[in-house]
Amino acid sequence: MMKKYIIFIFLLLNSLSSFSVGNSLVGPTTVDPGTYYSYRANLDGWDINTVVRWKITNGRFNNVNGPTELRQAIAVLYADVVWDDTTNKGTITVDINGPVLLRIEVNINSIKNMYITDFRYNGSKVTNDIIKLPLGQTGILECTVPEMAYPLSKNKITEFKWETPKSWGGKTFYSGRTIKVNYNATSGNGETIKVTPLGFRSVLGNTKTITIKRETPTFDGNIKNVTITSNKIYKHSKLYAENVTIRSGANVIMNGYNSVRIVPGFTAELGSTVRIYNGTASNSMTRGIMDENNNIDDKMVKDKKDARMEQNNPNPAKGSTAINCYIPLETVNAYIQIYNTMGGMVLKLPIGTKGQNEIYVDTYKLPNGIYIYSLVTDGRLIDTKRMIIAN
């Protein structure tokens, strides 16, 4: 009896020894999800009718909706595999009636390991993940992220999850790598635009978050296409006014340190006050007097030590108008200069008397329209006012 057991053990060991020779499971060990890969197994020393079981984790056999377990005759031992999009490793095992005989482990290039490295709006690259938009302006943001693809198969990522600011009527939706977002004039500050790539089977990747920052725009010296209804002060080295309407009751100061240019389309209604300076005016030139009803007296604060000029009377002028001004005793020369709305000087009237003066202007010499006149003493612009001529 003992001899029979010894012979049986010897035959079993001999069988296992012959089984282990040439056994293998081969195929790619670094893969992209959603792509077909082939794996081949080899088992020596078994009957050709033996049934072998394949098992897979984080993948499917045969097709994207295939099984996770496969049975084959030992003579075949070939399988096509589609891997899932996951950061976990994928595995394939081969066994016969339970014990695992072969095993292979693969690394999967998941969308979760990929990042959006660039974000552009209206063609400009976003820096520090912040889009700066000026307050008071509306428009359209065309947002674009770069093309993305799996590294081995080069299969492109074609769908992205987008989330836009709620204050702009935003929502969550799925689209390509470019979208357009309408933004309003006032809101959105601190809100975000988010974009997330979708991998195989709509697995979400890493989200790129862009923060919106609304800023008070830097004044560039241009006053264009605006209607001014309240008190405003504009300061810049070069002022340019075009298609500007100043409503009655508004008090507007324009200080161009180097130049002021006003082109046709500039309208100041009766009851408005417009002061235009070239250079930094003294306090006495820029002060207005407010009454209890917040109406602005367009006469300057009187100070006998300072040069000053009053509004012409009558205004609108017909035939002639008078401009009262005060010239300090120490003044060397003084002029009243009259400009058209193109910025061209049309009259230069010298003032030869110190103290209080009343300068008469023959308006028949000028076409009807709006004019700007200034008091200049010793090369310094003192005050600027508006004159209407209606002959």
Image (spheres, rainbow, N blue to C red):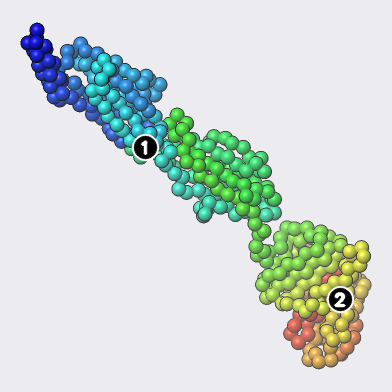
**Residue under label 2:** 300
Task: Count residues near mark 2 (Cα–Cα under 10 Å), then give few for <14, some for 14-19, many for 20+.
Answer: some
Q: Quadrant of residue 386?
A: bottom right
Question: As drawn, is 293 to the left or to the right of 84?
Answer: right
Circle 1 SS class: loop
**Residue under label 1:** 109
| Residue name at image x 82 percent, y 78 percent | 284
Percent from the top left, x then y, of residue 387? 85, 71
Circle 2 SS class: loop
Q: Residue furthest left?
A: 3
Question: As drawn, is 136 to the left or to the right of 5?
Answer: right
Identify which residue, 54 or 299, lies in the foreground: 54
Q: Nearer the viewer, mark 1 or mark 2?
A: 1
| Residue name at image x 85 percent, y 71 percent | 288
Identify which residue, 191 or 22, lies in the foreground: 22
Percent from the top left, x then y, of residue 278? 73, 76
| Residue name at image x 17 percent, y 13 percent | 47
N-term mark: 1 or 2: 1
Mark 1–mark 2 CB contact (< 8 Å): no
Identify which residue, 52 or 333, lies in the foreground: 52
Q: Residue furthest top?
A: 1
